[in-house]
Image (spheres, rainbow, N blue to C red):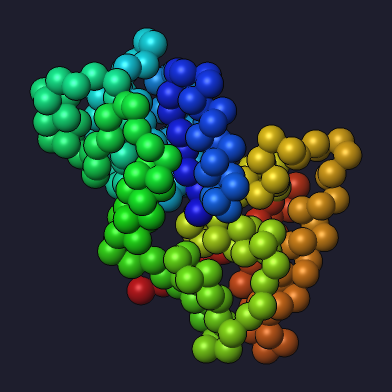
Amino acid sequence: MNILVIDDERELLDKLNSVLTSEHYTVETASNGSEGLEKAWNDAYDLILLDIMLPGINGLEVLSEIRAAGILTPVLMLTAKGDIKDKITGLNLGADDYLAKPFSLGELLARIRALLRRGNTGSPVLEVCGIRLNTVSREVTKDGEPLALTTKEFALLEFLLHNRGRAVSRFTLAEHVWGDNFDPFRMSNFIDVHMKNLRKKLNSPDQEPAIKSIRGFGYLIEKEEK
């Protein structure tokens, strides 16, 4: 599951990154509203943690912009302010939940799990081309048969399914799976090795490849035509 954390408190941002990563979430961070808004527009996330008090574009403006763009990703608002008006404004703009600072990490994780279970469609299942991936139970099947995927293979497939119908670059995939640890010079073949193994597990001899290569760019899982 991919989470975007937007907060200008560096110490808190680093702590949340560490805690969420230890809980096996993939985490992206942004320290101001403009950076957070750009990331929300350019990548798919399962959840956004959004502070209200941000430099430049504040959290309420970020929320308004992403909802206006049709992005339905669940948003958990974070704020140090106790003003009930902020809470009401955030909820009216489309926030899904609200947590005031300081908060316990246990409560934060519980809120995150609840929002991820709810999701933006009511279902944790991503399904296309006979592939069925449950983002909560982490079970994957192809044409009804269970598949045993490694952690990296699961992350690759989940991200491509979230972006089905849209080509995803190799670098974006690598950043999603390996995060800040990805070194494009030293680890350039990592994505190819894991993708080869994943495609081998997904592909059947009598079917078109589920994951298509876009030469010189990356990979694509196409949407099924209605």
Of residue 179 and residue 212, the one placed in the foreground of this image is 179
- Residue 180 visible (yes or no): yes
Q: Quadrant of residue 113?
A: bottom left
Q: Residue at left 55%, top 81%?
A: 141
> Could you say where residue 78 lies in the image, as x and y percent from the top left?
32, 30
Q: Is residue 192 left or right of residue 214?
A: right
Please tell me which residue lies in front, 224 or 4: 4
**Total number of numbered labels?**
0
Q: Is residue 170 left or right of residue 140?
A: right
For the point 53% across and 75% down, the residue is: 139
Q: Position of residue 157 (x, y in %)?
A: 60, 63
Q: Position of residue 183 (x, y in %)?
A: 80, 36
**Where residue 90 sits in the image (x, y, percent)?**
19, 31
In the displayed structure, would residue 75 be above or below residue 167? above
Residue 42 in view: no
Q: Could you say which is closer to the camera, residue 143 or residue 22?
A: 22
